[in-house]
Amino acid sequence: MSSNIQIVFPMCAMFLIVVVVLVKVLIGRFSAVKNKSVKISFYKTLTEGQEPAEAIQAVRHFSNLFEAPVLFYVACIIGMILPVQNIAFVVFAWLYVAARTGHAIIHLGKNNVMTRMKFYTFGWMMLIAMWIMITIKAISIATTV
């Protein structure tokens, strides 16, 4: 299987992380309403009261999955288009997903900030490596045209 197709699988795994966190957000919100920690009217404008800390944490993590990971999806797509036919690119993508998985588990669990930051930093290192490979491939294509 070419690495061009293999890059789709880490993208699917990253999407699965988003879905799992979304489910955690929904469960947390339903639970907060059921336990009367927050009134359902809160969700009309998010101004009448405050969600429990655990629900806020899950929502914040869900929002975070639409920040740096967007650059991951873009890198994967550009890597397919150019194409960056390199197994290292796929390995970096999987390592990024592993880092984001660890980051999610920690953030939504005990939330040890220092450990979480290590996973976050490692993920960024993998993302930067992917973008360096894209840049090298783009320069290679541009100089041969």
Image (spheres, rainbow, N blue to C red):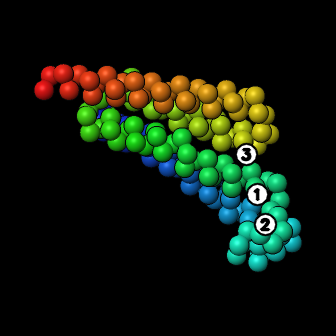
| Disc on the earlier residue, 3 or 2 | 2
- Helix, strand or loop at mark 1: helix
Quadrant for residue 101, please give it: top right
Residue depicted at 43% across the width and 43% down the height: 73
Residue depicted at 13% across the width and 26% down the height: 145
* Inter-mark Cα distance, 3 to 1: 10 Å
Given the image, on which type of amino acid does mark 2 rest? Ser
- Helix, strand or loop at mark 2: helix
Given the image, on which type of amino acid does mark 3 rest? Leu
Q: Which residue is mark 2?
A: 31
Q: Nearer the viewer, residue 142 or 78?
A: 142
Question: Is residue 34 visible to the viewer in this orientation of the structure?
Answer: no
- Residue 113 point in image, percent of width and height: 76, 33
Q: Which residue is mark 3?
A: 108
Residue depicted at 44% across the width and 46% down the height: 12
Between label 1 and label 2, give the one nearer the viewer: 1
Residue farthest toward the right in the current orientation of the protein: 36
Above or below, 57 against 10 in this view is below
Residue farthest toward the left in the current orientation of the protein: 145
Local packing at callout 2 (Cα closer than 10 Å; few below 14, some 14-19, many 20+) is: some
Question: Is residue 128 visible to the viewer in this orientation of the structure?
Answer: yes
- Residue 100 point in image, percent of width and height: 59, 37
Local packing at callout 1 (Cα closer than 10 Å; few below 14, some 14-19, many 20+) is: many
Q: Which residue is mark 1?
A: 55
Disc 1 vs disc 2: Cβ atoms closer than 8 Å? yes
- Residue 129 point in image, percent of width and height: 45, 24
- Residue 137 point in image, percent of width and height: 28, 25
Q: Is residue 143 left or right of residue 64?
A: left
| Disc on the earlier residue, 1 or 2 | 2
